[in-house]
Image (tube, grey):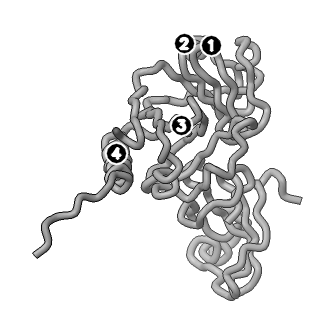
Amino acid sequence: MTCPVNGPRAISEFAYGGEIRPMPDPTTCSDDAWADYIFNRNGSPGVKREWWCHTPSNTWFVAERDTARDVVLRTYLYAEES
Amino acid sequence: MSAITFENVSHTPRAGVKGPGAAAWLAALDLPVPRAPNSWLPLPGGLIARLGLTEFLVEGSEAAKLAAPLAPGVYPVLRQDTALVLHGARLNELLLETCSVDFRALDLSTRPVVLTSMVGVGATVIPGEEGGMPCCHIWCDSTYGEWFFETLTDVAGELTQSSQPRHQGATS
């Protein structure tokens, strides 16, 4: 995997942080919507935006990964998102 | 003769800062600021390294400058590292055995800083050359220091043994 700051590294240097999911406003959303956000995860295969961390430098970044093929398509810092 | 020598330089003064205002704050202290992430610059009796985008490590007597009052957007980083300097003809073999970065592929003229995992421990490495032989400066969390040092010296010992001529024992 390629860290946007440190370059290509062995996958053993990275930690998975979960799929990026927009958080609903807990003060206005329904209990069902909040429970869905807290407890449910989307396990269907496809291209997903995920949090990953390069652990030696503690660099968190975004990876677009095709979970059906386990292929990382792109990595970038969250601030660089276009 | 050992193939790789180890020097423990953990006692050297060092300090760190991070944050969006760190680069400007260091420049205001009359310290040279490495422009590229993961690069370093020499200081009188030490160095300054840029770790990633907005974190800095200063080692040597100039580290005392970081005791100045912090500016907004600058945060102190506790540096209680185990710091080692390794030197020897077979150093690259040691690095190849203990981490996944090929240091021979790096251009030393760009003064690279490598943040990687060595024997499972997060480490900051500055590779160099001294007297025609490879050397490197390594920092890691001091809580791993003893194990880190012992593991590297074990690997270095195996490299030393493998470089010495084998003595044939008596055959039956």
The crowd level at tag 2 (other Cα within 10 Å; few <14, some 14-19, many 20+) is some
Residue B61's disc number:
2
Whether residue A5 appears in this view of the structure is yes
Kindly report the distance in space between the C-alpha atoms of the residues bearing marks 3 and 1.
Answer: 19 Å
Callout 3 touching callout 2 (CB < 8 Å): no
State which chain disc 3 sits on: B
Dot 1 or dot 4: first in sequence order is 1
- Give the residue pinned by disc 4: B153
- Give the residue pinned by disc 1: B44
Residue type at mark 1: give it.
Answer: Pro
State which chain disc 2 sits on: B
Q: Nearer the viewer, mark 1 or mark 2?
A: 1
Q: Are marks 2 and 4 on the same chain?
A: yes
Q: Is residue A13 above or below residue B172?
A: above
Residue shown at the point (78%, 73%) measured from the top left: A73
Callout 1 touching callout 2 (CB < 8 Å): yes
Q: Are marks 1 and 4 on the same chain?
A: yes
State which chain disc 1 sits on: B
Dot 3 or dot 4: first in sequence order is 3
State which chain disc 4 sits on: B
